[in-house]
Amino acid sequence: MERHIEVENMEVLINFFGSFDENIRIIEKELDVAVINRGTDLKISGEPDAVGKAVRVTQNLLKMAQQGTAIGEQEVRYVLSQIEEDNDKALETLGTDCVCITSRGVPIRAKTLGQKEYISKIEKNSIVFGIGPAGTGKTYLAVAMAVKAFKNKEVNKIILTRPAVEAGESLGFLPGDMQDKVDPYLRPLYDALGDMLGGEAFQKNIERGLIEVAPLAYMRGRTLDDAYIILDEAQNTTPEQMKMFLTRMGFSSKIVVTGDVTQIDLPSNKKSGLRDAEIVLKNVEGIEFMYLCEKDVVRHPLVQQIVKAYEKKNAERERMAQSRNKGKRSNP
């Protein structure tokens, strides 16, 4: 079977093909089809079912390219996975909304359906928990939404915080004063804000007190009005710290809490505040939980495989633990 697609814009076609035609090679390999272009004409040939899927993948990727999305391996594989699940309708809405523009002029958009839902929940709720593995854009998109609200004068201040919990290294051995010691923990937040605002604007807003990046301990005793507050790495809070943080919320403020429950660095005898919040706050109106998964990972494709492998191992451990507990109950 053979199908043809006409592409009017050559720049869109170049974006779709990718560097050294790598995007086309992925489609050909995954669907066992041949894709040939003659000028602006794309010819797709192969078995009927495979050609049909390849056409749907191509049309969705071309639409994303027209919207200004840079097409790479992650985008191609994600669209392939969604076409396999017949999510064509949902894909049509992907990439249509721009959250904000970075200091380099790059538009920030949701790259997966999970990310799109995450953004929607942040827009509609006062407190949102974004829970998921590394690389799903939990923190970056939360910061982007904070910058958007700040630029639109919906809030007067952005506050980013995270617990300074040690993960195999001791704070005491780091050089400098206390601020120097905690800065490495806050570096991902500095980087995200600097990317969106530009280094000079970011520094000016820091000096004016309009942007604050601080350890979680600095939040105690404060009431935060007209602020966009983001708590990152929330899996490393205790239940007491989580309660303290959430009760800092003032009028006209919004809170986004992000974390990965598979990367808890607390001592084994301490409960994670993020896990505790999932139970305590699950039915509170105005609070939403958004769970991202390996399909929402937008880093190198290997990150998806790493996340999937660890999730499989953790599931096996939980099954074994449950089995041991059952054995103990049946043999008193």
Image (tube, rainbow, N blue to C red):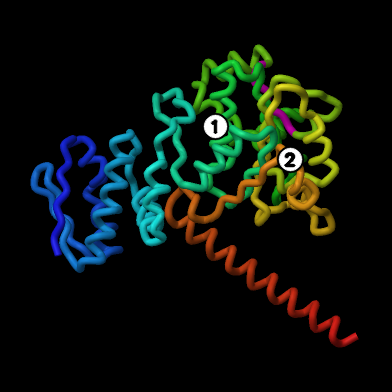
Q: Depth-wise, is mark 2 or mark 1 nearer the camera?
A: 2
Q: Residue at x 80, y 55 (%)?
A: 267
Residue that mark 2 sits on: 285
Report if residue 213 lies within the magenta region: yes
* The N terminus, quarter of image: bottom left
Q: Is residue 286 visible?
A: yes
* Amino acid at the residue labelled 2: Glu
Question: In screen coordinates, is 39 left or right of 301?
Answer: left
Q: Residue at x 8, y 47 (%)?
A: 38
Q: Residue at x 37, y 48 (%)?
A: 75
Q: Nearer the viewer, residue 37 or 50?
A: 50
Mark 1 closeness class: few <14, some 14–19, many ≥20 residues within 10 Å = some
Q: Secondary structure at mark 1?
A: helix
Q: Residue at x 66, y 26 (%)?
A: 228
Q: Position of residue 195 (x, y in %)?
A: 49, 28
Q: Nearer the viewer, residue 126 or 143?
A: 126
CB within 8 Å, label 2 to label 1: no
Report if residue 41 lies within the magenta region: no
The magenta span reads 210-215
Q: Position of residue 147 (x, y in %)?
A: 56, 24
Q: How many marks?
A: 2
Picture quadrant where residue 256 is located: top right
The vertical placement of 202 against 16, above or below, is above
Q: Which mark is residue 192?
A: 1
Residue lying at the far bottom of the rendered structure: 331
